Amino acid sequence: MSTGNIANPILAGFQPDASILRVGDDYYIATSTFEWFPGVVIHHSKDLVHWRTLTRALDRVSQLDLLGAPSSGGIWAPALSYDNGTFYLCITDVKARRGVYKDLHNYIVSAPSITGPWSDPVYLNSSGFDHFLFHDTDGRKWLFNMQWDFRKNKKRFAGIVMQEYSVAERKLIGPVHKVTEGTDLGVTEGPMVYKRGGYYYLLLAEGGTGINHAATLMRSRSITGPYEVDPDYPVLTTAGHPEYPLQKAGHGSLVETQNGEWYMVHICSRQLPDGSGLSPLGRETAIQKVVWTEDGWLRLAAGGRLPQLEAPAPDLPPYPFPAEPARDEFGTAELGVHWHTLRVPADDSWLSLTARPGYLRLTGRESLNSWHRQSLVARRIGSFRCSVETCVEFEPECYTQMAGLVLYYDEQDHFYLRISHDETYGKHLAVVTSERGQYDEAEDYVSVEGWGRCYLRAVIDNENTRFSYSGDGSDWKSIGPALYTGQLADEYQRKLSFTGAMAGVCVQDLRGTALHADFDYFEYREHETL
């Protein structure tokens, strides 16, 4: 049995809003994907220590249409549950998020297995995000979600509401109950519901998803309330501790092991060491052991409210998974489970792994500013010290055709080492950046006229990011200035967005001739030192 510790975060990089579920001896976590496709990453473990990316639940447009979705829109805070042989997944699809209104729609999908096939969505409501389906012991099902209020002089986060869900009718039925307006921490959202010892427990995210984030517990003898607040709330927070290595702790989800131990997974973030407070890796997932007090409240096993960098492992046999290879040679007919595309599925109209076996072929489409049809494939960055590398074959004919290696937060903020062609330099390399939507090009253009292959690399060393290139994969030369990694963070210049830095490859053809590029491999490596 395990006697060690669990290192936090358990899911590194852009993996927020974790919802954890145990079925038998298997543990699953669902995390948010926002504008990235496929939607909802599902992770798997048997010991809470070792985790693997298992699948993505929403893999077809009939389940999730993100075309035109705003950045940091799309899928928010999925919630997993299980009852009587069926897995359920609550999903919120956010269509507009700026301004006073929130255009969003809540759905539920179901499956006989965690790996699917997941059903097409059943519509529930649009009153607010972060919904959770609770399966009561009497067979009834209840949907909880936060309620949004756009009116003047009202709290936007207007409390938690609940309504019964009918499986037979595939819709919500009966009256809507408001069960709580939250505490003085404010911004009450993310309801998760549990039943224990004759109480219904309501675990809430409060304080906003930034540095004041927290997890608060309430309870009631009745499902509809009234709910009393934990007298020593919140259970978990890093508010008031700006020096702490795990920030933004909150939005919890609970699980009980086969042996009666309890754990909470939660949001956290790690900040750059430069004192900026920026976290370009995005909001990550950590885990804490928790215990129940004699009077029926929840506490961190370590004491206090701060999340631990290492949590005691449960009394379960260790179950490690094989290490993921650092290099993807594109030797299969479909993209691996770590890859995402931006808003649109990877179909053969623009992406192929078979047109040239052993290569990823991307057909150029819209620009890196588009909310529609980009030809971009990317994976999460999970470390402040890492390198990414690719090799591309591409023959542009004009400046409107580009291909290369991209570090991408969104259309406003990204770094791009791209190949293009113009009347001055011919076929050449250059570093292109976008900072809060302001386009720029580094001035050291490098001619690669006559090169059949271009090797491209990016190295992230904490706050510094540098690009380099090679003609043979051995002799590397730097290109462009040192770039500030913090620009790829949620909080950069008070951006108020919710994803994280991604690394990938992309192609644009802005004159519409569908020129393609072939990528031989993609390599992602994390380093202790650089």
Image: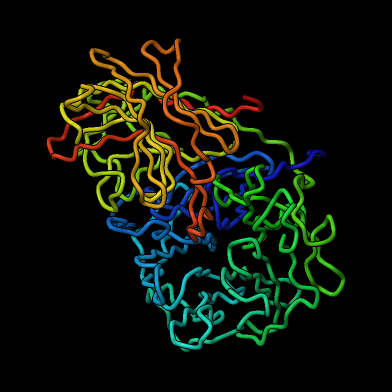
Residue found 47% across the figure and 70% down from its top: 129
Query: Front-most of 352 and 157?
Result: 157
Quadrant showing the N terminus = top right
Q: Which image quadrant for residue 337?
A: top left
**Residue 125 visible (yes or no):** no
Q: How is the image coloured?
A: rainbow
**Residue 503 visible (yes or no):** yes
Q: Is residue 167 above or below residue 511?
A: below
Give the image location of residue 64, x and y in percent: 33, 57
Q: Which residue reaches farthest right?
A: 294
User: In this rendering, would 516 be left or right of 434?
Assistant: left
User: In this rendering, would 429 be left or right of 285?
Assistant: left
Quadrant showing the C terminus = top right
Query: Front-most of 492 and 338?
Result: 492
Residue found 51% across the figure and 59% down from its top: 494
Residue found 41% across the figure and 77% down from its top: 100
Q: Which image quadrant for residue 247?
A: bottom right
Give the image location of residue 407, x and y in percent: 43, 38
Query: Front-most of 335 and 260?
Result: 335
Give the image location of residue 406, x and y in percent: 39, 35
Give the image location of residue 526, x and y in percent: 58, 29
Q: Is residue 290 above or below residue 458?
A: below
